[in-house]
Amino acid sequence: MKRICLLLALIAVSVAAWAQHPQPSHSYLEIYDLATRTHRVVKEFPHVIEAPNWTPDGKWLVFNMDGKLWKISPDGSSDPVEIPTGDITQCNNDHVVTADGKWIGLSSNDPANRRYNSYVYVVPFEGGQPRKVTAEGPSYLHGISPDGKTAAYCAFRGPEQEQDVWAMPLKGGKEIRLTDAPGLDDGPEYSPDGKHIWFNSVRTGRMQVWKMRSNGKQQTQMTFDEDMNSWFPHISLDNQKVVYIAYHDYEVAPDSHIADLNVQLRMIPAGGGKPEVLLDFFGGQGSLNVNSWSPDSKQFAFVSYRLSEEITAPKREMAVQLYSVRTLLGTPEQFARNHGYVFSRLVQMGYTAVEAFGYEDGKIAGLGPADYRKAVESAGLTFLSSHVSHPLSAQELASGDFSKALAWWDDCIAYHKAAGVPYLVMSWSQPLQTKAQMSVMAAYLDAIGAKCRAEGIRFGYHCHSHEYRQVDGTTMIDTFLTETKPENVFLQMDVYWAVMAGVSPVEYMNKYPGRYELLHIKDKYELGESGMVGFDAIFRNFQRAGTKGFVVELEQASTPNILQGLRKSALYLRNASF
């Protein structure tokens, strides 16, 4: 991240660049309570703020905003109050309040230095003209010793700009290099007794939490996460626990720490141990850069974010197929652990409903109908539809007797009726080899649809690409549409797979008007980026097609970050003119 910061500084784009957020964001200053394992918003800001410190007397939270330092009451009862810093007005998110509460150490660019490097300064807590501490930059402050005499910081030094932990007296003097391992060492912070420095290091190939003696000796790895990169450990004032921020390894390189990503708050005992995940949230750079523990070690402050465009873009009714997030919700265990965060992010992106998948043996994600619906609706979503699959066997296709398969649907329909879902969709059938097989399948679909209609549910069939292949002078999709009753069966076209099959979605929407009550809106990756699918023409033909709703699906994103892909897709649709 320091490389990115330095690049931003060198090009000097604007004051906003010092906040290191590439996109306009809303900020939520929050407090996490360890006793209740809950968090509350102190104040919402329609712009970027970063990195709260909790003052030793418990009266203030200090944060940076627009290159300056501010303070606010932890209960949110006061408006933010600026802490004057003279002509030092490019403060970044590395600042520390001394243990006696009298001083603030901060990192900022020097307006007199055209290289725009970050330097360490100190200023009285009530404000004034900061005094420069480090003669060289870049220097990013993260810790001040409990006695207030020594600063610990990440510095870029030498011809190779090696990024290590350094320390020097706050009154000035010689700086001392404490680490020299390959790669980035960052985030140094003193333990309350001053005996140790906690930091994060990428020396093992993955960013992890480490600690060492305050003189740099006995450097010891403290976290061993296999799929996360761990940043900025903060030790509680009772010296018992360490909270830190963790990035999923598919989000960023191990030595990167950027904004606007899906991250976790994690905690370990100060003596080491298995991390506890406290919270999944949208944040990253600026969320937890500096120590923010309350004086009683029972709470800490952090900042979560939302992209401003997620809030301001036009609203649109649109569902999301949860198969898109199968890596997060694909098993009952994953669903139980992750659905709260995933659903909340989908709502923030602008999705209004879900299409479920994975019904099996009377449950979805291990839940009965009432519990599954509650999980969806408690997040502010509606349960629009559900994908299920129970195709016919080769023997049933040959004999035309599908009574046993049809009976399977009784429990399935009962589940979805109890869940209050209006649409039930058969998600797949194997490619059929003859016209006779197609007719048997069409009769099967019509019979399922009649059962659903009797229970007040609309039934549909979901198309991929093989349904458009010519067999015996016709196709599966044409057979299904001509040999089923419209009151029993609708078709859910997947517009991407129609394009991949070499047919025009609009031509089929016009060929069978009124039969496409739901559509799958999909592209190769994020919506609108391939240029292969004419979404504008598809949306203009909704009325003729009988479309009452659509479902966004991403089978894969352009990066492993599927939530980022869903976010891009949601904003594409919300801002589209069609």
Image: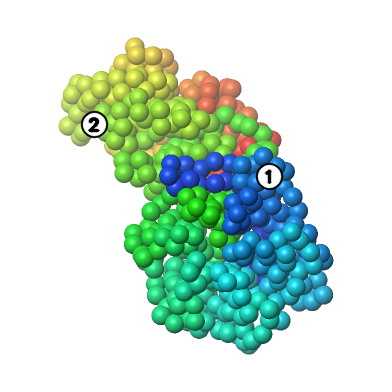
Q: Earlier in the sequence, mark 1 or mark 2?
A: 1
Mark 1: few/some/many CA within 10 Å (<14, 14-19, 20+): few
Circle 2 sits in a helix, a strand or a loop, which is it? loop
State the residue in front, 450 or 144: 144
Image depth: mark 1 or mark 2 in front: 1
Q: Amino acid at mark 2?
A: Asp
427 left or right of 516 in image: left
Quadrant location of the C terminus in the rendered image: top right
Please give the residue where the numbered disc 1 appears in the rendered image: 45
Q: Residue at x 64, y 42 (%)?
A: 76
Q: Quadrant of residue 145?
A: bottom right
Quadrant including the N terminus: bottom right
Q: Residue at x 55, y 60 (%)?
A: 291
Give above or below for 476 relative to 158. Answer: above
Q: Nearer the viewer, residue 432 or 362?
A: 362
Residue 430 placed where, x, y %? 30, 38
Label number found at residue 361 = 2
Residue 47 located left or right of residue 41: right
**Residue 71 visible within the image:** yes
Q: Is residue 459 above or below residue 290?
A: above
